[in-house]
Image (cartoon, grey):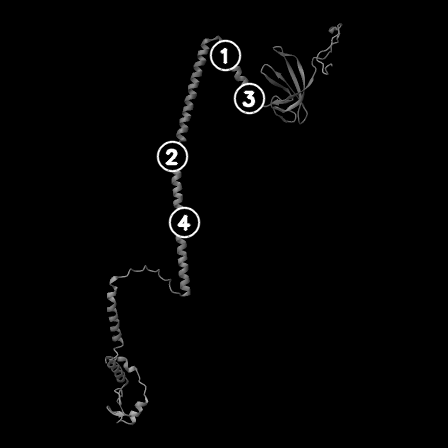
Amino acid sequence: MSERKVLNKYYPPDFDPSKIPKLKLPKDRQYVVRLMAPFNMRCKTCGEYIYKGKKFNARKETVQNEAYLGLPIFRFYIKCTRCLAEITFKTDPENTDYTMEHGATRNFQAEKLLEEEEKRVQKEREDEELNNPMKVLENRTKDSKLEMEVLENLQELKDLNQRQAHVDFEAMLRQHRLSEEERQKREQEEDERETAALVEESRKRRLLEDSDSEEEDAPAPPRPALRPNPTAILDEAPKAKRKAESWERSVGTLGSRPQLSGLVVVKKTDLDQSARRDPAASAPGAVHNGKAAGPAARAPGSSSLSQLGVYSDSDDSSGSN
C-alpha cells in the first residue's frame, strides 16, 4: 500500500532539468512579512507614538546597490496606526541595528549617538596605543591620576556625610525612653489633678446642699474602739459618790428641809377642818375614837415646808426601825 504523503518524487529516465522554464521575477520584488517595531518612534504626520515591539504587517524589499560585506540590506514599509502614513526603515548590519529613513523620528536617539561616540573614541585610542608605546604610558598615567582624584573626592564626600549625618542609635533609644517616661509622668499628674478637682467640686457641692437644707453636718468618722482599762473599776465607786453629792447639793436629802420646799403646797383634808372646829381633839396626846392622834397632826399655823420635813423625818425613822 502506497503512502499518502509521499516524500520521494519519481523522475522519468528522459528527464532534463534544463528544459524547465525559469520564472522571471523582478529583483526589487516586495514580500509581505509580519514584524515588530525595532525601536520607539514618533510619526511626523500626526505625532503618534509607536513603541518598540508593536506588531505590523510590513512590506519587505531588498535594497539595490547596497551591501555590507556581502550581506544584503532590507527595507521595510509600515503604516502609522493613527493616520496610516507610510514609514520606512532598513537594516544596519554594520552596527547590528536598524536605521530610520523617513516618515518618523526615532526616540532616544541622543543616547544611541552618545554610545556610538564612546565606541569611536575607544577605538581611536586603541589604534594610537597599537603603534605608539609612549602613548600607552601617557594614557596609563592619566588613568591612574584620574582614578586617584575620583577616590579622594569620594572619600571627602563620605567624611562630609559622616560629619553631617552622624547617627547615634543608643542616644536615639535613650531619648525615646526619656520622652516616654516624661509623657507617662505628665499623664499621671494630669489624672491626679483632675481627680483632686473632682473631689473639691463634690465637696463644695455637698457643703452648698447642706447649707441650703439647714441640716446638720455629716457625722464624724467613727473612732476606733479604745482598749478596756483594767483599773477602770476602781473609778466607778468615786463616780457614784460624786453623783450622790451633786444630787444632795442641788435637791437636798430626804430628812432635811431643802430650800425649794416652799414651792410644795399640801392639800387641805377633812382632818384639818375638824381640827379647826375642835382644838382640844387636835392637841397632842389626845385620843380620838380610842386612838391617839399621830405625830403627823399639824398644829394650826404651820407651813407646808414644815409638813414636808415631818413626812420625811417619819419615813427616815420608820426605815431605821
Of the two numbered discs 1 and 3 on the same chain, state the one appearing first in sequence: 3
Mark 1 and mark 3: span between their CA atoms?
23 Å
Tags 3 and 4 touching, CB below 8 Å: no
* Residue 183, image quadrant: top left
Distance Cα–Cα, label 4 vs label 1: 82 Å
Give the number of the mark in front: 4 or 1.
4
As drawn, 46 above or below 318: above
The disc label shown at residue 126, or none: 1
Label located before the other in sequence (2 or 4) = 2
Q: Is residue 163 above or below residue 301?
A: above
Secondary structure found at label 2? helix
Q: In this view, does 301 lie above or below 173?
A: below
Q: How far apart are marks 2 and 4 (CA)?
A: 32 Å
Mark on residue 211? Answer: none
Image quarter (top left, top right, bottom left or bottom right) of the C terminus: bottom left
> Which of pointers 1 and 2 lies earlier in the amino acid sequence?
1
Label 4: which residue? 191
Name the spot of residue 288 as percent of width and height, x first. Answer: 28, 92
Q: Name the residue under label 3.
A: 111
Give the residue at x 38% y 42%: 181
Q: Mark 3, mark 2: which one is toward the viewer?
A: 2
Q: Give the residue at mark 2.
A: 170
- Circles 1 and 3, Cβ within 8 Å, touching? The answer is no
**Residue type beneath disc 2:** Glu
Depth check, mark 3 against mark 4: the one in front is 4
